[in-house]
Image (spheres, grey):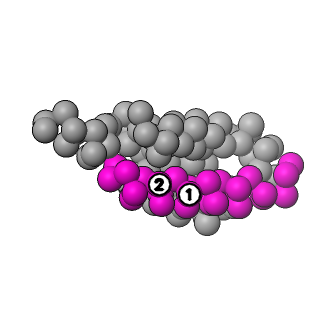
Amino acid sequence: MSVSRILKWITGGLEAVLGIPVIGATIIIGFSWLPLVFMLAFHIVTLVLTKKDGGASTGSILGIITSCIGWIPFAGMIMHILSAIFLMIDAAKPDDKTIKNVVA
């Protein structure tokens, strides 16, 4: 399993926690919106490694968008949940390099 897939599982889990209505809002507001900045950086790193490994980047791109608009109360919650779903779906898919190695 590549590093990018592991990071997708981690970022997907963190997005899922931030998508829980009361808990996610408490975390984000309690830390003065710093979790959104942290997640933005985390998604960018994940996207760069995903591109390097040849994996699906939909979840990471959606996570970057979510981190930028996550401060909007209900839209942020919905976006966190969607990001978590897409990240975990992307993490479950094998990387393109893995498929090429199996076929070759």
Quarter where residue 72 is shown: bottom right
Location of residue 49 with respect to 68 vertically, above or below? above
Hey, which quadrant is residue 44 in on the image? Answer: bottom right
Q: CA distance from mark 2 to mark 1?
A: 6 Å
Q: What residue did someone put label 1 on?
A: 45
Identify the secondary structure beneath mark 1. Answer: helix
The one nearer the camera, 14 or 95, is 95
Front-most of 47 and 40? 47
Which stretch is magenta? 30-55
**Which residue is located at x 64 percent, y 60 percent?**
41
For badge 2, the amino acid type reads Leu
Q: Is residue 89 above or below residue 66?
A: above
Residues at marks 2 and 1 touching, judged by CB atoms closer than 8 Å: yes
Q: Quadrant of residue 73?
A: bottom right
Which residue in the structure is indicated by mark 2?
49
| Nearer the observer, 53 or 8 | 53
Task: Please name the amino acid that badge 1 sits on.
Answer: Val
Q: Position of residue 30 (x, y in %)?
A: 86, 49
